[in-house]
Amino acid sequence: MKDISIMYHYVQIPGLKGIFPFDPKEFELQIEWATKHYDIVAPDDLNKPRGKKPYCVLTFDDATKDQYEIAFPILQKKGIPAYFTVMSGPLLERRVPVFHLIHTVLSFFTDEEIWRELTARFDVKAVPERSHYYSYESSPFRRYNKYALNFHLTEQQSRSFLEEKALSVFHSFENFINSYYINEREFIKMCQAGMTLGVHAAHHRPFTGDAKAFYDSEIEPCRKFMADRLGVDAKWYTPAFGGGTQAERMMKELGEVLRDHGFKGAFTTKSGFNNGLDSFWLHRYDCISLPPRSEVPWK
Ligand SMILES: [Zn+2]
């Protein structure tokens, strides 16, 4: 069977500059397209007897507020189930992963402004030449900023710079986290409405290579947070950054650890079809690679 899963991140009105949101109108059109060709099911139902259509699972990463405020009401209105993932670190430790701080800061300040400040505060002379890693970014300052913040500066340097900028917009971390992420009360509401919740990460780190240690540091704290605070026994997992550079090794070594802890399956960032729950690691298509944004390649 040619089942599919669709991967969503931000679903919101374009306009914020640092990120690539999927327009709510496009989202609705995509749901209509998917409903026509697939039975949209919760992950738990992938094994159930099926009708004529293949199955489709809608998956959401990173638990940003737009998913609750925009995507969830659309799904609820249409009576469609979906799978959302929880990132426990920001909610529990009030600490935002650096990549989300970057999204925020690039959304609220101009690229020139950020680059000027970085130049004034750090030695970033080597950055312009090395920044072709981000050649898909058309603005040179955007390239420099992303390279400097993600690779050139230490995590601590990036974090303190970005936190200071984010605080100048949101005034307190409490306010930032409350505006940026789905909170506990909202997750519980989503559950009550029939949405599935799974584990994304504690701190959004890529796979480290040591499956047991990675489970203990990135997965178990989030699973426990969900059990204690949301009353959810998590059975589904979506690795941060799809596992990162060691994704292949993750799929070989982490699956067994997850199964031992009662997980039923996991959603990767690799595109491709699925066949029920034949494989523990399920493929996903990015929403932008499907209609209405793009023509389906296999039709
Ligand atoms: Zn993520």
Image (cartoon, rainbow, N blue to C red):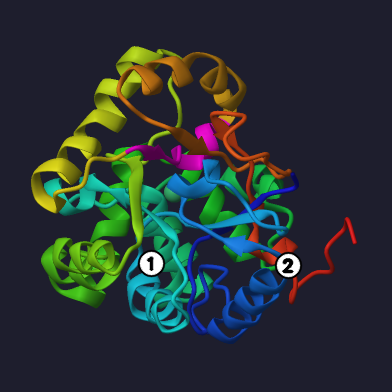
Residue at 19% x, 45% y is 226
**x, y percent for residue 19:** 52, 68
**x, y percent for residue 67:** 39, 70
Q: Earlier in the sequence, mark 1 or mark 2?
A: 2
Residue at the disc numbered 1: 104
Q: Is residue 160 something that shows in the picture?
A: yes
Q: CA distance from mark 1 to mark 2?
A: 36 Å
What segment carries the magenta color?
Answer: 235-244
Q: Is 18 left, or right, of 271 in this rendering?
A: left
Residue at 42% x, 84% y is 77
Q: Is 33 left, or right, of 121 in this rendering?
A: right
Q: Please, what secondary structure does the residue beneath circle 2 have?
A: helix
Q: Is residue 120 something that shows in the picture?
A: no
Residue at the disc numbered 2: 37
**83, above or below 220, in the image:** below
Count neighbours of disc 2 (C-alpha within 10 A) and say few if under 14, some if 14 to 19, many if 20 or more: few
Q: Amino acid at mark 1?
A: Thr
* Quarter of the figure with residue 220: top left
Residue at 45% x, 57% y is 119
**x, y percent for residue 206:** 45, 32
Q: Quadrant of the N terminus?
A: top right
**71, above or below 277, in the image:** below
Which sits in the foreground, 272 or 122? 272
Q: Is 113 left, or right, of 165 in this rendering?
A: right
Which sits in the foreground, 3 or 123? 3
**Label 2 within 8 A of ligand 1 by Cβ:** no
Which sits in the foreground, 57 or 218? 57
